[in-house]
Image: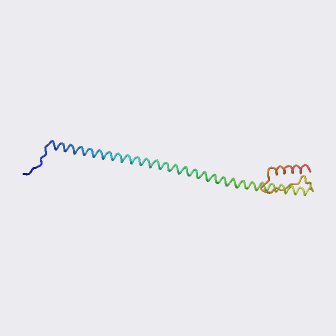
Amino acid sequence: MSHSRVSCPASATRKTTALSANHRQRRREHAEALQRASSDSRTAREFQRRMKHAAFEHRERKMAVQALQARIQRDIQFLTATAADLEKREFLLDDAFESYEHALRLELGLTDSACSSSKQKQGGASPDARTKLMGKRACLISSK
């Protein structure tokens, strides 16, 4: 004799209810997993967006700093060249004045040692040398 499985309606209902509950649980878990994945994806996109913006601002600031450094370097080079040019001009002015003084002495026949000048051609005249030159100019004017 063979036993055929005949299920009773209460047992079938329990199985159906259990299967439905399992199915709902799996769907809920799947929905939660999708929600987490979606949230993680949004978070990753937001991170990438903010990092892209920050990287852009960083590059902009870095380029501004580099441009400022280059401008300062050009200004330093210009000022250094200008200072060297001014030193040369000062030397030439002092030399021209001393040459004029010497020529004027020769023209006027002056040999007075009180009014003689000492040449200061080493790196331009110092403030003391300029004062002496002014005194010599006064000496030349008073001897006329």
Where on the picture, by quarter, is residue 100? bottom right
Q: Residue at x 66, y 53 (%)?
A: 76
Q: Can you say whether 92 is above or below 34 in the image?
A: below
Residue 15: where, in percent of width, then height?
19, 44
Q: Is residue 108 left or right of residue 19?
A: right
Residue 28: where, in percent of width, then height?
29, 44
Residue 144 appears in the picture as rendered:
no
Residue 105 appears in the picture as rendered:
yes
Q: Residue at x 89, y 50 (%)?
A: 139
Query: Count the marks: how many?
Result: 0
Where on the picture, by quarter, is residue 20? top left
Most foreground residue, 64 or 31: 31
Residue 130: where, in percent of width, then height?
82, 50
The chosen color scheme is: rainbow
Q: Residue furthest left?
A: 1
Q: Residue furthest front?
A: 1
Q: Residue at x 12, y 48 (%)?
A: 5
Where on the picture, by quarter, is residue 80? bottom right
Q: Is residue 50 left or right of residue 121?
A: left
Most foreground residue, 75 or 36: 36
Residue 71: where, in percent of width, then height?
62, 52
